Amino acid sequence: MTLSIASINVNGLRNNRNRDLIFNWLVSKKFDIICIQETHCTKSDIDNWGNDWKKFGGGQSVWNCGTSDSRGVGFLLQNKFSENVTFINHDDNGRCQMCDLKRDNVVYHIVNVYTPNNGSDRKTFYENLHNLSKMYDDDSVEHYTVLLGDFNCTLDKKLDRLPSHQYNDVGTTELKKSFVEI
């Protein structure tokens, strides 16, 4: 059985028309799990936006709120998705959200991030991600971490930027460490 996961920065879902267009498009793509970033979701939006997702044929939605004009991440599941999933909000400011998906003797830890725009804040954010791998102490199953989202920096300054920058971003080194350590 395959599992399809998508990640997209939605650049805000506050506009009803844009939210409808995005939700309709995402449902049509039939991804099992969709990680969205920069939702601009507040706690008062959760029920309405969850109902909107279902109106277009989606299933469960889980949100980690930012403010009405910044941050926010979410998980959107397809309607027919029936896996055993546990959701965890990793922070209180809408920048990181996780879910654990159990399948057979394997646990997939899916980490959805929207990292800060500021380089030094981004570096600190990535340093804190290093602690994620220490959370999994159950040796009875295999663990795999899937890190995705909007990293707000590039891994390869020549390949990922045009024009290329001379120096690496301050968060790039920490991001690369995250890939190794998580």
Image: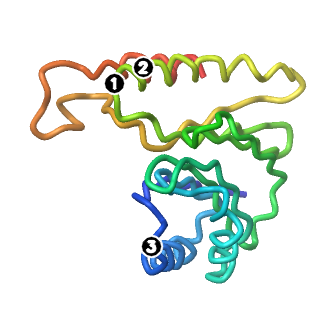
Callout 1: SS: helix
Which residue is at 66% across, 56% downward? 43
Task: Locate residue 130, reporting x and y percent.
Answer: 59, 18
Cα separation, mark 2 vs mark 3, equals 31 Å
- Residue 15's label in the rendered image is 3
Disc 2 crowd rating (10 Å Cα; few below 14, some 14-19, many 20+) is: some
Disc 1 crowd rating (10 Å Cα; few below 14, some 14-19, many 20+) is: some
Q: Which comes before the other along the chain, label 2 or label 3?
A: 3
> Marks 1 and 3: CB-CB under 8 Å?
no
Disc 3 crowd rating (10 Å Cα; few below 14, some 14-19, many 20+) is: few
Callout 2: SS: helix
The quarter of the rendered structure image containing the N terminus is bottom right
Left or right: where 89 falls relative to 147: right
- Residue 143's label in the rendered image is none
Q: What residue is disc 1 on?
A: 119
Which residue is at 45% across, 49% downward? 70
Res 53 → quadrant: bottom right
Task: Locate residue 151, reporting x and y percent.
Answer: 41, 36
Which residue is at 48% across, 44% downward? 149
Vertical comparison of 104 with 44: above or below? above
> Marks 2 and 1: CB-CB under 8 Å?
yes
The quarter of the rendered structure image containing the C terminus is top right
Looking at the rendered structure, the kind of residue marked 1 is: Gly
Looking at the rendered structure, the kind of residue marked 2 is: Lys
Callout 3: SS: loop
Task: Locate residue 131, reporting x and y percent.
Answer: 65, 17
